[in-house]
């Protein structure tokens, strides 16, 4: 292609004047592989200047519980899409039940995630907090699991009930993960 | 690719207005591009832009916010102050580089 077409200067539209957009993720899972979708999408939303909330409930509490957030696990069990990297051959489900297999699968997945220069969960949350995410813990889950605010990741803004979350997420696109 | 005139220079841009030729960029253009999107360049802005341009040569792609923070040493929070709302796209635009392709 030749550069012959002279045009007036085009300035990209960065949406600064656009109506404010808002997004809320409900994080309900504590598996390593299910922690990342919301983290990655929240990162993308924040990069785009979108007001972003994350509400952690039930097993999702493990993502913000100081005692568990560093050590989320990945299991092959129940995952029929399980195959070795670079292969399309599914691994037998029974393999996942062997002793040590969850630890091995977790180690493999963590190394693949690190290979993509994607941080581990706590560091990822630090990054999202720096970008302006608002983190909320589910009151019922906190009570059920006998947790206190001090047990939770420091970036969590508050422990709130579902009514408050519904208020906060008014007008937001909500994703349940 | 369309050719347009910015700061008195003919430059090649894509349909959105991002410069496409690394060598066509200079600081005067960077200042003008920043002005186009309401940013007054300071030393802190230049530090980011210079890192992006040097890193692009090394890596062949535009650094993501995370890379600017972890490798370039400019905290993410600061990037949101320097290039408000959409720092990844705005800093690339000012630096005369494509938008970052990576997710993180």
Image (cartoon, grey):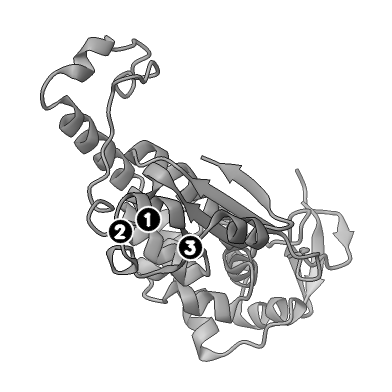
Asked whether the residues under marks 2 and 3 belong to the same chain, the reply is: yes
Up-down relation of residue A177 to residue A63 (above or below): above
Query: What numbered label is drawn on residue A142?
Result: 1
Label 2 environment density (alpha carbons within 10 Å; few <14, some 14–19, many ≥20): some
Sequence-wise, which precedes: disc 2 or disc 1?
1
The chain to which mark 3 is attached is A
Q: On the rendered structure, is A42 left or right of A108?
A: right
Examine the rendering and report whether any part of residue A151 can be seen: yes
Q: Nearer the viewer, residue B28 or A155?
A: A155
Residue appearing at x 60%, y 44% in the figure: A175
Residue closer to the observer: A27 or A74:
A27
Pick whichever, A62 or A79, lies toward us.
A62
The residue wearing badge 3 is: A135
Toward which corner of the image does residue A28 lie, by quadrant?
A: top left
> Which of the two marks, 2 or 3, is nearer to us in this view?
2
Q: CA distance from mark 2 to mark 1?
A: 5 Å
Kindly check if marks 2 and 1 are in contact, taking CB atoms under 8 A apart as contact.
yes
- Can the viewer see residue A118? no
Determine the image quadrant of residue A159.
bottom left
From mark 2 to mark 3, how far is it between C-alphas?
A: 16 Å
Q: Looking at the image, which residue is at 11% across and 27% down? A: A100
* Residue B74 location (% of width, % of height): 42, 76
Q: Which mark is residue A147?
A: 2
- SS of the residue at dot 2? loop
First in sequence: mark 1 or mark 3?
A: 3
**Secondary structure under the numbered disc 1 in the rendered image:** helix
Q: Give the farthest residue toward the left.
A: A99
């Amino acid at each position: 292609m030749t550069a012959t077409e002279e045009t007036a200067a085009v300035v990209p539209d960065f949406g600064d004047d656009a109506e404010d957009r808002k997004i809320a993720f409900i994080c309900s899972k504590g598996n390593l592989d299910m922690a990342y979708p919301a983290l990655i999408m929240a990162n993308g939303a924040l990069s785009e200047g979108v007001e972003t909330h994350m509400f952690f409930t039930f097993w999702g509490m493990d993502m913000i519980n100081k005692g568990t957030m560093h050590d989320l696990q990945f299991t092959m069990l129940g995952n029929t899409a399980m195959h070795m990297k670079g292969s399309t051959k599914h691994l037998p489900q029974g393999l996942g039940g062997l002793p040590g297999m969850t630890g091995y699968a977790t180690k493999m997945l963590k190394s693949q995630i690190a290979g993509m220069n994607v941080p581990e969960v706590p560091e990822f949350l630090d990054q999202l907090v720096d970008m302006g995410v608002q983190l909320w813990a589910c009151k019922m889950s906190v009570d059920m699991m006998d947790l206190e605010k001090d047990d939770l990741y420091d970036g969590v803004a508050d422990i709130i009930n579902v009514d408050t979350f519904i208020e906060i997420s008014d007008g937001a696109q909500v994703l349940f993960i | 690719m369309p050719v347009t005139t910015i700061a008195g220079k003919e430059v090649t841009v894509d349909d959105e207005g991002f410069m496409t030729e690394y060598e066509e960029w200079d600081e005067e253009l960077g200042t003008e591009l920043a002005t186009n999107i309401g940013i007054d360049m300071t030393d802190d802005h230049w530090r980011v832009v210079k890192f992006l341009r040097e890193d692009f040569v090394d890596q062949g792609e535009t650094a993501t916010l995370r890379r600017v923070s972890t490798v370039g040493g400019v905290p993410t929070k600061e990037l949101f102050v320097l290039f408000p709302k959409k720092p990844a796209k705005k800093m690339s635009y000012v630096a005369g580089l494509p938008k970052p392709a990576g997710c993180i």
